[in-house]
Amino acid sequence: MKVVASSRQLQGSSASRRLRRSAKVPGIIYGGNSEPSKIELDHNPLYHALRVEAFHSSILDMELDGKPERVLLRDVQWHPYKPVVQHIDFQRVAADQKIVLKVPLHFTNADASPAVKMSAAIISHVITEMSVSCLPGDLPGFIEVDLSNVQVGQNVHVRDIALPAGVSAVLRARENPVVITVTVPPGAAAFACGAGSLSCVPSSVAFGSFAAGFSSLTNAPYHERRSGRRCELFYAGCAPFRRNRFAAPRIHQ
């Protein structure tokens, strides 16, 4: 992504306030073999760029007074309650020096995993980004976590993730944080395997058996409300379960 900036000469809180009133954002570039440079950027293009995920986890091409710079976004300061950028920091990068940056995680194939399909399990994302170390040319925009083989009760850790070539996770010795957890909600396991056997039972009987069984497992009283082909179950403290009266019952999350 490309960023356009210009140098600024005036410094201090008063000069920064005047910049913000003129729809500009004060910033700084540091690192590399050059001295830190004070810069200013247009607020609106910067604000919309900050809403893009890749802007936070990729090498940016900055045009500073017509000269190209390769930088990383390092810090952003926001107004306490307004959607206004107050200050921004960039770091220069060199092609032969490793960098450390947080990269987002993209979770795929969760719906196709045995835990979800066979046991109606819930997959919880404990972390959504991780710190990696690599050369600028090897920096990925995101890391994909394939959940197609996740089983019930299995936890995926950082060291279990397949990383791209040249990329390593930044971890302390013996550190292995949990990325996702797989749990089965109460009552789901009892009906996940029995849903198919209920498909041949008349809908009113099957749905009534499902409701009674769920109520006995959760100790939650329920009542039904039917309208045409739709049926709703209301449990104490739970959202209503909506089912087609002619379909096999199953657990709704």
Image (cartoon, rainbow, N blue to C red):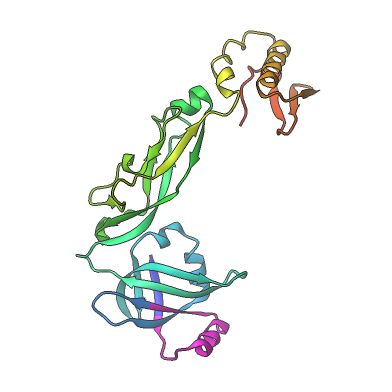
Extreme residue toward the front, this view: 174
Q: Where is residue 131 in the image (x, y as percent from the top left)?
A: 35, 55
| Vertical relation: 119 (above or below) 209 | below
Task: Tell me the quarter of the image containing the C terminus.
Answer: top right
| Vertical relation: 1 (above or below) 23 | above
Q: Quadrant of residue 20?
A: bottom right
User: Foreground residue, 44 or 40?
Assistant: 40
Task: Tell me the quarter of the image containing the N terminus.
Answer: bottom left
| Vertical relation: 69 (above or below) 179 | below
- What's drawn in magenta, residue-wise? 6-28
Residue depicted at 58% across the width and 24% down the height:
188
User: Foreground residue, 247 or 185?
Assistant: 185
Q: Can residue 136 be seen in this view?
A: yes
Residue depicted at 59% across the width and 26% down the height:
186
* Image side of residue 9 versus residue 174, left or right: right
Q: How many numbered tags mark residues here?
A: 0
* Image side of residue 35 versus residue 84, left or right: left
Q: Can residue 146 be seen in this view?
A: no
Q: Quadrant of residue 206?
A: top right
Q: Position of residue 119 (x, y in %)?
A: 51, 23
Q: Position of residue 98 (x, y in %)?
A: 24, 62
Residue depicted at 49% across the width and 77% down the height:
42
Q: Where is residue 241 in the image (x, y as percent from the top left)?
A: 70, 28
Residue 150 sits inside the magenta stretch = no
